[in-house]
Image: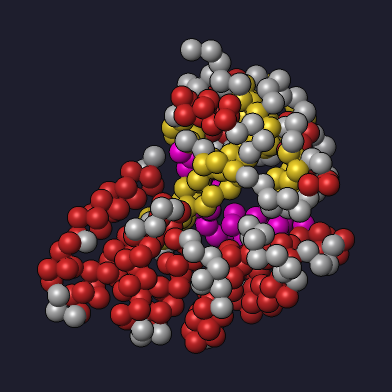
Amino acid sequence: MSKIPVTVCIIAKNEEKHIENCLKHLKKYDLEVIVTDTGSTDRTREIAEKYADKVVDFEWVNDFAAARNYCTSFATNNWILAIDCDEYVTSIDVRILRILMQKYPRYTGVLRLKNLIPEGNNGAKGYVSDDVPRMYNKNYFQFDFPIHEQLRFKDKSKSDDVMEAFLLPIECIHHGYALTGDDMRKKQERNIKLLEGSIEEDPTNGYYFFQMGQSNFVLGDVDKAIEAYEKGMSLVDNLDNVYVPEMIMSLAKAYTAKRRVDDALNFIEKYVKYYNTAKFQFEYAELLRKNNQVLKALAMYIKVTTMQDVETIGENLITCYGCIISIYESMGNKQMAELFHNQFLQCVAEKERIVNS
C-alpha cells in the first residue's frame, strides 16, 4: 500500500519523557513526521532525530500557533495531522482515513482525544474525551492564537464561515493531563502568563477568558475561574463558537464547587435545548441529581446513553450507568437496574483498556 499522504507535525520543548513513545507509536503507519524543537535543553532533539523525517529549530516567541505553522511549512504533503509529544496514536483505520480525505478535501479532521487524568492521590488514572480539530489541508487552514491555538481559515474573508469537519478514525491517548503537583502548577502558571499577554492585546476575545478560567480552576482558585468565565460569557456574540458550550459547562461546575448548585442549574438550563450533545446533557443530568430532581435526572442519564456522540463523555459513561442503576435500586426496581448492569461493566473494562494503553 502506498504511503499515506499525511504529514504529522509536532512541536516540542524538553519532552524527552514522552517524545520517544509518541514517535514509536507513529512509526508503523508510514507517515511523514516533522518535529519542530522550540529550545530543548534535554535529549528531545536527539531522540526526535532517530525517528522523524525532519527536525527543525524554531526560536520561541511565546506563540504556539506560530510554532505549529512554522512546522507545517516543512511538510511535503498538503494534509497535516498536528499532535503533541504526550499524545500517543494507538490505532488508525487507514482505509477509512483515505476515503474521508478524498471525499472532504476542505474539511478539518476532528481527533477524539482520550485524556488521561489523575484520580485521587494513589496514582490511579481515569480519562475524559475531548474532540479537537487536528487534521487539515494546509492550503485552506492554519493555526491562530498564541496560547490554546485553534485552526482557522487561511482566507480571512471566511473567518465567520462554519468550519465543516469529519471525525478521524484515529484513537489517540493524551498523557499530559495526568501531570500532578509542581508540573501541573508550572504548566498552568505558564498558560496564565501567556493568556494575560493575549488579553492585553485583545480584551474582547471571550476565548482567552475561557482559557484563563480553565487554568485558574485547575490551580484551585475557583473565584478567579468564575470571574474569568463570567467575563468570557459577557463577550459571547455567537453561541456556535466551539468553546462556548465548554465555557458554560465549566462555569456551572465552578458554581457547584462553591456550593451554588441552584445557580449552576438555573444557568445551564438556559442553554440545555440549544446544545443537544451528550456532554452537555450529561452535565445537566448531574445538576438535576444534585438538586434532588431524581426522576428528571434518570430520564436525562438514559437519554445520554442513547445519543450518537455518547463516546465524547469518556469515562463519565460509567457514572451515567452507575447513577441509572443506583436510582432504580433506590426505587426498589431491581429488574430495571439489572438491565443496565452489563453496559456498566463494559464501560469499566473500556476504561481499564484506555488507561493501560
Q: Residue furthest top?
A: 1
Depth order, front residue of 224/166: 166
Taking the image as shown, residue 53 lies to the left or right of residue 99, namely: right
What residue do we see at 25% from left, 51% from top? 346
Depth order, front residue of 169/357: 169
Residue 218 position, x and y percent, is 58, 65
Residue 170 position (above or below residue 99): below
Residue 148 position, x and y percent, is 69, 52
Taking the image as shown, residue 337 lies to the left or right of residue 183, namely: left
Residue 191 position (above or below residue 36): below
Residue 53 position, x and y percent, is 65, 19
Q: Residue furthest left?
A: 335
- Residue 242 in magenta stretch: no
Taking the image as shown, residue 109 lies to the left or right of residue 151, namely: left
What residue do we see at 48% from left, 36% from top? 170
Q: Main secondary structure of the magenta part?
A: helix
Task: Count the labels in the image.
Answer: 0
What residue do we see at 45% from left, 67% from top? 281
Residue 324 position, x and y percent, is 27, 69
Residue 84 can be seen, yes or no: no
What residue do we see at 63% from left, 45% from top? 164
Residue 242 can be seen, yes or no: yes
Residue 204 position (above or below residue 347): below
Q: Residue furthest right?
A: 201
Q: Where is residue 207, by image quadrant?
A: bottom right
- Provide the residue span drawn in magenta: 171-194
- Residue 173 in magenta stretch: yes
